[in-house]
Amino acid sequence: MREFGPVANSKKVLAVKQVVQDTSGVIFERSIVMGRVGSLKGKVNILRPEKSEYTVWFDGKEYTNRIEINPKLKAMVVNLKSPEPEWNGEKVFTFPPGTGAYCYYSQILECAQVMNFMPKAIAAGGGAMNLHVVWEGYPYFQQQYVGIPDELFTQATFSYDGENHKGLRRFSLSISNSNQIIFYHVNKDGSLAAIFWPAQGLSIGSTGSEE
């Protein structure tokens, strides 16, 4: 289940709520991420990661984190709460040097829309943009999904691959330093039809095949 929309009383803060569950309704993980619409050097619109909360269950035990940006430190602050001693307390992760877009994993599509990449790529028949993925589930996410770099920020490329036989527009997220590729199927009105992550056997928003 995935929901997207502006936060009440704030048109510039956009939120994505997501729940991953099996066919019987058992919830494995849930998250909410919030991004604030801003600009990069006053030129390109971006959806800056602002705060998030993520919960996952391992063997019936709850693991939670909360992440929030600290502009003064130019960092993301991660607060962990879990049954494991090493996964508790606060950790500070400074943004890597250089400039560029940073997007929560659950908000990649919305980031691309705010940056106007999607309509430009569709009009051109192809295109790619570089970004840093912010893993809102760190470090628990990396324990659940094999092959994800053990870091909060990971470089990635978001590309437009054209239309499939159903008329859906297909985008892909290639994660650097791994063999992970995530596919996004988008309706012609720009809404998300489905997400497929073949390497993890994960699909969100559809029960159809990845093809």
Image (cartoon, helix red, strand yellow):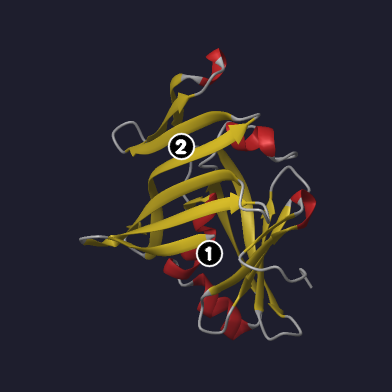
Q: Amino acid at mark 1?
A: Leu
CB atoms of marks 2 and 1 within 8 Å: no
User: How packed is label 1: few (under 14 Cα within 10 Å), some, or many (20 or more)?
Assistant: many
Which residue shows up at 76% across the image and 68% down it?
210
Residue occupied by mark 1 = 109
User: How packed is label 2: few (under 14 Cα within 10 Å), some, or many (20 or more)?
Assistant: some
Which residue shows up at 45% across the image and 55% down it?
17
Which quadrant, please, contains the N terminus? bottom right
Q: Nearer the viewer, residue 129 or 211?
A: 211
Say left or right for 202 vs 9.
right
Say left or right for 199 vs 182.
right
Residue 185 percent location from the top left of the image: 64, 72
Mark 2 residue element? loop
Residue 191 percent location from the top left of the image: 51, 75
Image-quadrant location for residue 92: top left
Which residue shows up at 61% across the image and 83% down it?
124
Which residue shows up at 59% across the image and 81% down it?
122
Q: In the rendering, which numbered label is found on residue 71?
A: none
Q: In the rendering, which numbered label is found on residue 95?
A: 2
| Mark 2 → mark 1, Cα distance in angstroms | 21 Å
Residue 88 percent location from the top left of the image: 48, 19
